[in-house]
Image: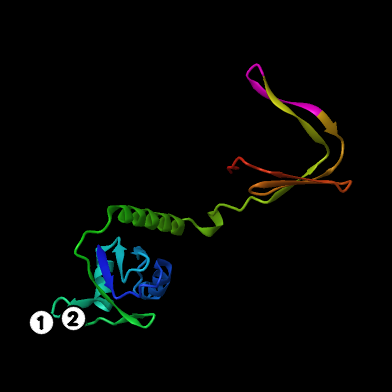
Amino acid sequence: MELHLRNVPAQSTENALRNFLKPYFQKLSIQNFHCQKQRDKSYAQLTFLNIDHARLFLEHHGHVKDPRNARRSLKASRNGANLVFLGQIIYCERSNRDANPYFLRVLAKEQLERRSLALVPSSHAKPKILPISFQCSSLSCGAWAYSDTELVFSPQVEWIVGGTAKFGERVMMLTLDDGRRVDSAITASWKS
């Protein structure tokens, strides 16, 4: 379901509006929503995955049009509390258009990810692997080649010197015992 917000300060950003609304959503236990506000516009849209959550938000912060002057006058619904953002009252009502199906798919995926993370105990969470260090006893430069169907390393130069090789997400640092250091950027992604 989509809700329409009017009288949003035009100078505000989508991020600022989302941060302003977060405590209201948390108070109502609403997690699955999308906020969309265009730059320099005085309106925004809220998309909810769960229709009941949208109705709950409307019940607490919605406004209804005054039947005597439907174009201009909005008043808080029976239980509605005004949302005041940057000194302006934001008027919230049900949108006259359907929710964007793309946003609904994204919200459903986020909800599924949150649920799957909640089911996995923290002791089974994926451990942090990098950075990791290894001791080394030599350093070789050479080339990889195939011998029949087997991939083999053919060293062209080799130094017998100890050290430590430390691997990060995108870098490898080799610190040799004699004080020399070799840094290397990793362009391929590591998969664990």
Q: Looking at the image, which residue sits at the far top?
A: 148
Asked if residue 18 is among those painted magenta in the image, a careful observer would answer: no
Find the magenta span and give its range. 147-156
Q: CA distance from mark 1 to mark 2?
A: 8 Å
Task: Give me the disc on residue 73.
Answer: 2
Q: Please count the marks in the image.
A: 2
Q: Does dot 1 land on a helix, a strand or a loop?
A: loop
Which residue type does callout 1 highlight?
Arg
Say how the picture is coloured. Answer: rainbow
Check the picture and name the quadrant holding the N terminus: bottom left
Task: Give me the disc on residue 26.
Answer: none
Task: Give me the disc on residue 68.
Answer: 1
Q: Can you say whether 1 is above or below 92 in the image?
A: above
Q: Tell me which residue sits at (28%, 68%) in the image.
A: 53
Are circles 1 and 2 on residues that touch, CB within 8 Å? yes
Q: Nearer the viewer, residue 18 or 191?
A: 18
Q: Looking at the image, which residue sits at the far front?
A: 40
Q: Does dot 2 land on a helix, a strand or a loop?
A: loop
Which residue type does callout 2 highlight?
Ser
Q: Give whichever of discs 1 and 2 has the lower sequence position.
A: 1
Residue 176 in the figure: left or right of residue 133: right
Displayed quadrant of residue 137: top right
Residue 98 rendering spot, x and y as whole percentages:
22, 59
Q: Tell me which residue sits at (11%, 79%) in the image.
A: 67
